[in-house]
Amino acid sequence: MDEELKKRALNYHAYERAGKTEVTPTKPFGTVEELSLAYTPGVAAPVKEIDKERWKAYRYTNKGNLVAVVSNGSAVLGVDNVGALASKPVMEGKAMLFKVLADIDAFDIEVSENAPEKIISTVQAIAPTFGGINLEDIKAPECFYIEEKLRGLLDIPVLHDDQHGTAVIISAALTNACTIAGKNLAEARIVICGAGAAGISTARMLVRMGVPKGHITMVDSKGVIKSKREGLDDIKKEFAIETSSVTLSQAMINADAFIGVSKGNILHDQDIEVMAERPIIFALANPTPEIEYSRACNLRPDAIIATGRTDLPNQINNSIAFPYIFRGALDTLSTTINDAMLVAAARAIAAIARMPVPEEIERRYGRQLTFGKEYIIPKMGDPRLLTEVTAAVARSAMESGVARRGIASFGEYLDCLKARVDNTLFFNSEKMRHRSRTRNHNGCENRLCKM
């Protein structure tokens, strides 16, 4: 990170009111009567109703629109294992995105614990507060075990976004990239570099989307994951294949697509020069891609290239998926987020990119966006994500039997989602800036506190 960006980022987080989120009341509180309804004695009424019927918590509290963003900071993007406290800016950011993109309230909860069983027991203990659990930046392989156990213990959606959000958005982008490149996704030869949470889950997702396991070559820090390699854990064995390739460079020969979820600058020039015609290169390591974008463009002008960076075309970012997956799951009171819901999300996201782009999105990003090599995936905040992806997830939840609340009319539901679009802060950012300016005199934390 360059010094100027570092300075601006620190100022953004610290200016006047520290952090990125706050708690705001949703009911009037200006009279004695209103206070008596909000708290004692009136609050006893919903307490007794919920005590008699637990599902009434969704009617009388914010449980149905509240997500916990939980991390121990053991695998924070770009900075690795920094621990619970240092991960808080990231988790606050995730909570902010839930709110501004999908009108979902979220609390960031940083857990100072590395033992999986203790993380599981902690989340299980706090789960009654929430309608869903978003696990974040927990290292592999522990993240797989933690998510699996919590899904079995809880009756609310649990999603490790580093796994499934990443897999959904990569699958959507790869579907469209194959269409543009004239390739068949089911026949594509794919190299996935990085066998952690994101890499494994992406491979699983691509199999659900129709890619044969034998067409996926996974590479970790020790080389190609192959059947005869010793010391593989059960998760990596799932994608061990018969191949003569040993190194990443060997695996790249005639590959149709490269998906990098590893570390920066590990691809050499010759690695992409030997790929198939019209290759697809997703160099998603942050903040430094596996190969520099401009370099890849110069070496392979026929390539479709994506990164995880906001300042480059084709940003593949989880924020295009996770808010809307949770929105659909929360609106249907789903017990889980299953594979069918994830596939529905991926297909809906891919379909949006093939439609004409709203003018407000083109204005926000400062350029015309047309489905093609430099626009394979919708931009963050595209209003159709909140309507189309959410509705697809909700419909899939009902069809797959995990929804506890059905949607009688999807036409009316889409109208409700469109109303949320109008209310989301992403589309009212100027209003949010005004709110910040008018209340900054109250944000005195950083003026009074010196540590």
Image (cartoon, rainbow, N blue to C red):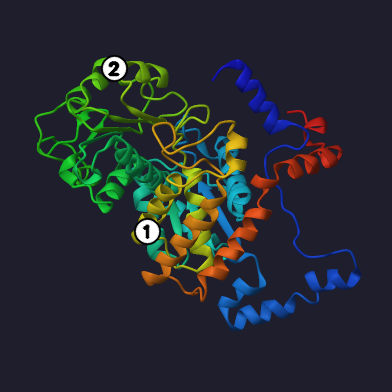
Q: How many marks?
A: 2
Q: Which mark is residue 149?
A: 1
Q: Is residue 246 left or right of residue 321?
A: left
Residue 180 lies in quadrant: top left
Q: Mark 1 or mark 2, which is nearer the start of the sequence?
A: 1
| Up/down of 158 relative to 205, above or below | below
Q: Is residue 39 visible?
A: no
Residue at 86% x, 38% y is 441
- On screen, residue 62 versus residue 178, left or right, reads right
| Percent coordinates x, y for residue 448 in the rendering | 82, 32
Position of residue 344 relative to residue 43, above or below, is: above
Regarding residue 144, the answer to whether it shows in the image is: yes
Q: Residue 279 in the image: state x and y as whole percent.
A: 27, 29
Q: Is residue 297 above or below residue 397?
A: above
Residue at the spot x=17%, y=25% of the render? Answer: 253
Q: Quadrant of residue 15?
A: top right
Q: Give the spatial CA distance, label 2 vs label 1.
A: 40 Å
**Amino acid type shown at disc 2:** His
The residue wearing badge 2 is 268
Residue 190 screen position, x and y as percent:
23, 36
Between 113 and 279, the one lying in front of the other is: 279
Mark 2 in CB contact with mark 1 (< 8 angstroms): no
